[in-house]
Image (cartoon, rainbow, N blue to C red):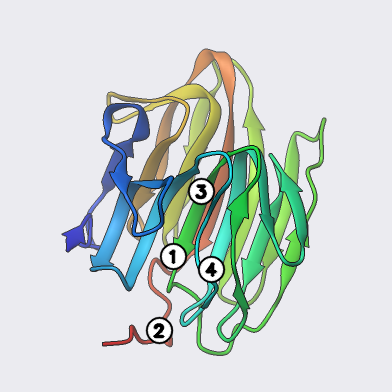
Amino acid sequence: MRLNDDLTSRAAAHAGRLPWTPSPAPGVERCMLFRIGDEIARATSIVRFAPNSRFPAHEHGGGEEILVLEGVFQDETGDYPAGSYLRNPTGTAHAPGSDAGCVIFVKLWQFRADDHAVVALPPEAGTSRRLLFENASERVWQENWAPGAEIRLPNPDGLEIFVLSGSFTENGECFERWSWLRLPPAQALGGFVGPQGVRLWLKAGALLQPNVCALEA
């Protein structure tokens, strides 16, 4: 399967308009935003766990990056409520699930082969800007933009944006809660924030790292 796989072009998706696709695990569904591959895939998705659903234990062949959107995500290392940010590098393993149900934003098989950082950040309320992760290759953060503000954001290396709440308009397209936008290098972001303001997850850096973990056959 290939979805929004041309990294040289702008890509956008709106989860509120997309179907949920069943996963191999009962009670776990996915809304796919970017994908290269079948069940083992380089992917960016929203994943929804029904109450008392679980994925079987598995190893992260190419890394896993998670932002918890709703509910409480759980695995052997603990309980992670909405707002938690996790990075599970290549070689780590877990059996994720949720007793009460949850929704997560997740990126798979997109780590550099030499990225071994384990990150588990709890929610942090009341911050207008929060750095989640940074190394020589990428920067990940959350940020609030004020209602009605004009957006002008440079993009030298590549930019990915996910709307957590509120809205903004870019290139005449409205991005609301759980909308996703990816811009190739040198395509700056320009637009306007909606009347309620907007809170975003952002990643700046190469859209596919030069030594990204190779997909398994």
Q: Position of residue 79 (x, y in %)?
A: 76, 52
Mark 3 or mark 4, earlier in chain: 4
Which residue shows up at 59% across the image and 60% down it? 96
Q: CA distance from mark 3 to mark 4?
A: 10 Å
Q: Residue 7, image x and y in percent?
A: 26, 63
Badge 3 is on which residue? 105
Q: Which residue is mark 4?
A: 64
The residue that mark 2 highlights is: 210
Q: Earlier in the sequence, mark 3 or mark 2?
A: 3
Q: Residues within 10 Å of mark 4 (few under 14, many from 20)?
A: many
- Say if mark 2 contacts mark 1, CB within 8 Å: no
Callout in the foreground (2, 1): 2
Q: Residues within 10 Å of mark 2 (few under 14, many from 20)?
A: few
Residue type highlighted by circle 3: Phe
Amino acid under label 4?
A: Glu
Badge 2 amino acid: Pro
Q: Position of residue 47 (x, y in %)?
A: 45, 47
Horizontal side, residue 89 vs residue 153: left or right: right
Direction from residue 47 to residue 23 in the image, left or right: left
* Label 2: which secondary element: loop
Question: Is 93 in front, or is 178?
Answer: 93
- Name the residue at 44% across, 54% down: 159
Q: Contact, CB < 8 Å: mark 1 with mark 4? A: no
